[in-house]
Amino acid sequence: MILFPKDEEFKMDVLREVGNIGSGHAATALSTLMDRQVDMAVPTVSLLPFESIADRVGGSEAIVVAIFLRIEGPAPGNMFFILRPGSARRLLARFPVFDDFEADQYSELELSALCEIGNILAGSYLSSLGDFTGLYMSPSVPSIAVDMAGAILSYGLMQFGTMGDDALLIDTIFLEGGQEADGQFFLIPDPESFNKMFQALGVPVE
């Protein structure tokens, strides 16, 4: 369980700034990857219990595309970037090479592109968080799955071991050409990792 900093608003300000800076870096990297301008809206940042993640992406039986990876370092944890199929397709449509696809299936190349998008986001947010805290955070090689949200989270628990009680949610909205695609980015630190992050920032915890 997170031992919340005494100054709750300051804590959230720090997390929002991590999201803002990270999304700016991600937009630049994605524009290079897609060879076209990609903007990202100012993200909404919130904290929620781990068991609420599936509800935020449509329920435990909702089919989603999920990119997940392990964070290693002094404040270890797990990351999930979750897209609904419609948003995944809108993102892929921005690559000229993906102008013909089957609605309910993904080729290896399409999954690779989505995995790279998740990897860029993870790297951007981790870099931002590391700059703020001074803690080195290294992401593992990402994995991707298309399945029910509940099954994906259960698999993450089996692969990575116990999860922390709380998750940092960064609602991510991509904007390009008058269209948008949205996804949810979840950082789930191991127990005590949130406290290590805030202690590194000099924020008192109860």
Image (cartoon, helix red, strand yellow):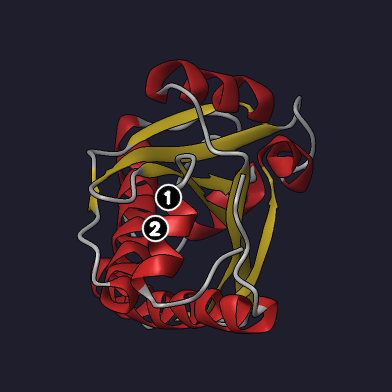
Above-or-below relation of 120 to 131: above
Q: Residue at x 23, y 40 (%)?
A: 140
Q: Quadrant of residue 165?
A: top right
Q: Secondary structure at mark 1?
A: helix
Pointers 1 and 2 in contact (C-beta within 8 Å): yes
**Which disc is residue 114 wearing?**
none
**Which disc is residue 196 wearing?**
2
The reply to whether residue 115 is visible in this rendering is yes
Calculate the distance from the C-alpha at mark 1 to the C-alpha at mark 2. 5 Å
Q: Where's the N terminus, which quadrant? A: top right
Residue 16 image offset from top left, x and y in percent:
56, 79
Closer to us: 123 or 36: 123
Residue 98 image offset from top left, x and y in percent:
39, 51
Left/right of residue 62 with respect to residue 185 in the rendered view: right
Q: Quadrant of residue 129?
A: bottom left
**Which disc is residue 193 wearing?**
1
Q: Quadrant of residue 35?
A: bottom left
Estimate how packed mark 1 is, as few (under 14), some (14 to 19) or many (20 or more) residues with alpha carbons within 10 Å. Answer: some
Q: Residue at x 62, y 82 (%)?
A: 178
| Residue type at tag 2 | Lys
Residue 160 image offset from top left, x and y in percent:
39, 25
Q: Residue at x 36, y 57 (%)?
A: 122
Q: Residue at x 62, y 76 (%)?
A: 12
Q: Where's the C terminus, which quadrant? A: bottom right
| Residue type at tag 1 | Ser
Left/right of residue 67 with respect to residue 200 in the rendered view: right
Estimate how packed mark 2 is, as few (under 14), some (14 to 19) or many (20 or more) residues with alpha carbons within 10 Å. Answer: some
Residue 132 image offset from top left, x and y in percent:
33, 78
Left/right of residue 54 with respect to residue 70 in the rendered view: right
